[in-house]
Amino acid sequence: MLVVNSDLGAAVGSKPGDKFGVASLSIYDMATGKPLHFVDLSGIRPGEKRFPNDVAVDANGNAYVIDSLAAAIYKVTPTGQAGVLLASEQFRGPVFNLNGIVVHPDGYLIVAKKVTGCCSKFLSANQRRLLLSVCRAHSSPLTASCLPRTMSSP
């Protein structure tokens, strides 16, 4: 089981410095409930506010965590090694942005950007090429691409 953790500053145990600063992924053994890995993501994008809020897993056990405020998608290997898969200013927007990720059985990622209603399909979890992006305004039909055709990793 994978659990994404962030701090909005509203929890009983929150400290003032933790608001939008905490970012982690905890991995547990489903059979025993024992923790396998605790992956601290908070140091990956220094100077950014953080709000990891969704995770998806591919067939090889890699986890992909989206961070709504740091404008990034992190990749965490089954051994707990973490890094930025993709980061882009195009992922930014007012308030919460990236909010939904799925690894398709064919190996590509589908990522949603809440504020624009865009869903983007990346060629594969290991390649950083955008294949398709469609957007839906709150009351309009799907429109043209909202992200660039090619993205790069920092």
Image (spheres, rainbow, N blue to C red):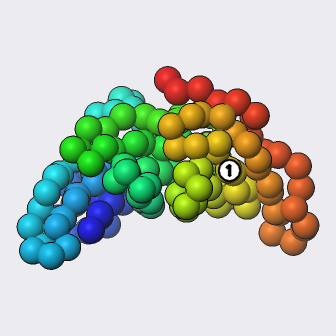
Q: For mark 1, what is the residue? A: 121
Asked whether the viewer can see residue 16, the reply is: no
Q: Does residue 100 lie above or below 66 as drawn?
A: below
Query: Residue at the top extreme?
Result: 154
Q: Nearer the viewer, residue 26 or 124?
A: 124
Of all residues, the one furthest to the bottom in this rendering is 31
Q: At 36% from the left edge and 29% from the top edge, which residue is drawn?
A: 46
- Picture residue at 29% right of the left edge, 63% below the top: 2
Tell me the kind of residue under disc 1: Lys
Which percent across, then down, holds residue 148? 75, 34
Return the residue nearer the eye: 19 or 105.
105
* Residue neighbourhood size for the residue with mark 1, other residues' Cα within 10 Å, grouped as few (<14), some (14–19), many (≥20): many
- Which of the image's four quarters has the N terminus? bottom left
Q: Nearer the viewer, residue 152 or 44?
A: 152
Q: Is residue 9 above or below residue 39?
A: below
Residue depicted at 69% across the width and 39% down the height:
130
**Is residue 112 toward the left or the right of residue 8 in the image?**
right
In the rendering, at what x and y percent does residue 97 appear?
59, 53
Q: Secondary structure at mark 1?
A: strand
Left or right: residue 25 versus residue 100 is: left
Q: Position of residue 80 (x, y in %)?
A: 23, 44
Q: Is residue 19 left or right of residue 139?
A: left
Please tell me in which quadrant of the rendered image residue 9 appears.
bottom left
Q: Is residue 46 left or right of residue 15?
A: right
| Residue at 55% in and 51% down | 107
In the displayed structure, would residue 146 be above or below residue 114? above
> Can residue 122 be seen from the camera position used here?
yes
Which picture quadrant has residue 113? bottom right
Task: Give the image location of residue 48, x and y in percent.
Answer: 42, 36
